[in-house]
Image (tube, helix red, strand yellow):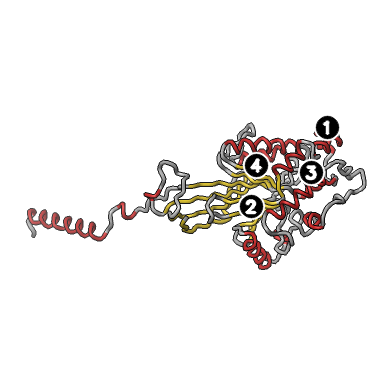
Amino acid sequence: MIPRSHLAIILATLIAIFWLVGTSFWPKKSALETPARKTAFRQRLVAVGDLHGDLENAQKVLRMAKIIDQNANWIGGTDILVQTGDVVDRGTFAFDIYRMMQRLRGQAADAGGQLVSILGNHEIMNAIGDWRYVTDEDIKHCGSTAQRQKDMSIDGWLGQEWLANYSSTALVALADHPQAPRLSFTHGSLRPSYPNLTPYPGNINRLGHSLLTKALTPPMAMPYPPNPYPGLPRALTDAEAELYAEGGPFWWRGLAQSPDEKLVCGWAEQLKAKLGVRRIIGGHTPNFERIVDRCEASIIIIDTGISSAYGGVLSALEIIYTLSPTAPNRIHHQDPLLLTQGTEYVEREEVHAIYENRRRQLAVEERTIRL
């Protein structure tokens, strides 16, 4: 039998051995923990599809995306909001939505944010006198047919707003540095073989502005119905007419509707190379259940039938872009938004579809870049 004094010595010795072994083979806690990267730059972008005259649902979506408050004022800070056209037709309150967007544009700019507005095929339809989808309630809400057309003319508040602040397509960069991802926004689908695709976006926007100016210059075409269908303004060039044709960016649906995924992904790669963009985003072709992403979210179609005229789901696309220095001591504590040339950053882009009660992740991309 081992005496008690010897047991105590043996126990103390074993404890010392275990302690020495543990500290030799197990790193300290600080070595096991990887400190979280601190963000030096963050940009959030929200994109919303066709609204078709439904002011209530438009505001619901913008509140859901944390762009506006209960009084429909901008709370998005430095966020970028993109609306991809077709504000008008099918509903009563399109002109109220345009007024709201007009106000939000100024509020966003004051806060360091941005509102990007795209023309849809229904804006052009209204401009040329094709009022097939204009509701009687819409006309009454505007006062009369004559007043509605006057507001849309080149001398009216809405016509001037369209010409000054709406474009046929938009190229949006997620940051100011040269390597930042750029995104293409158009109402319909961009066709890789469309002859006036490049230089992008200038060529398309020049043609769209010219077409719209001619359509809105009095005397404007009398609305159809009840008058005969007016067609395009007579003074249009062939290139302007092709912009509005079936294969142009206002009407074409190929990226959304083609069932051949391999073909669509081939188109996506062509467009990305030609336009210098990471993603091609549009509306026009509704899916009433979800935002549609194809080809690893290279193509995203955001029309979900938000207007009660369709009864689809309320949705918005959210993209969050961040830059975090790989070396924590390179953070600019005096100004966290100031980026340094020659510094290495981890670039991260998260893409989500936002719905009323859920979010769905569409893509996450991360890479290391040096500015």
Q: Secondary structure at mark 3?
A: loop
- Give the residue pinned by disc 1: 143
Comparing labels 2 and 1, the label whose residue is closer to the camera: 2
* Residue 91, horizontal then vertical, whole percent: 78, 41
| Label 1 close to label 4 by CB (< 8 Å) | no
Position of the N terminus by quadrant? bottom left
| Measured Cα–Cα span from mark 2 to mark 1 | 36 Å
Q: Secondary structure at mark 4?
A: helix
Q: Could you tell which of marks 4 and 3 lies nearer the N-terminus?
A: 4
Residue 89 is labelled as 3
Image height check: is 31 above or below 166? below
Q: Could you tell which of marks 2 and 3 lies nearer the N-terminus?
A: 3
Q: Quadrant of residue 106?
A: top right
Q: Quadrant of residue 239?
A: bottom right
Left or right relative to 89: residue 332? left
Q: Secondary structure at mark 2?
A: strand
Q: Amino acid at mark 4?
A: Val
Image height check: is 95 above or below 202? above
Comparing labels 2 and 3, the label whose residue is closer to the camera: 2
* Residue 307, horizontal then vertical, whole percent: 73, 43
Q: Amino acid at mark 2?
A: Leu
Front residue (pair 242, 327): 242
Left or right relative to 94: residue 146? right
Front residue (pair 164, 46): 164
| Measured Cα–Cα span from mark 3 to mark 1 | 16 Å
Image height check: is 64 above or below 5? above
Front residue (pair 233, 45): 233
| Measured Cα–Cα span from mark 4 to mark 3 | 18 Å
- Give the residue pinned by disc 2: 171
Comparing labels 1 and 4, the label whose residue is closer to the camera: 1
Q: Amino acid at mark 3?
A: Asp
Comparing labels 3 and 1, the label whose residue is closer to the camera: 1
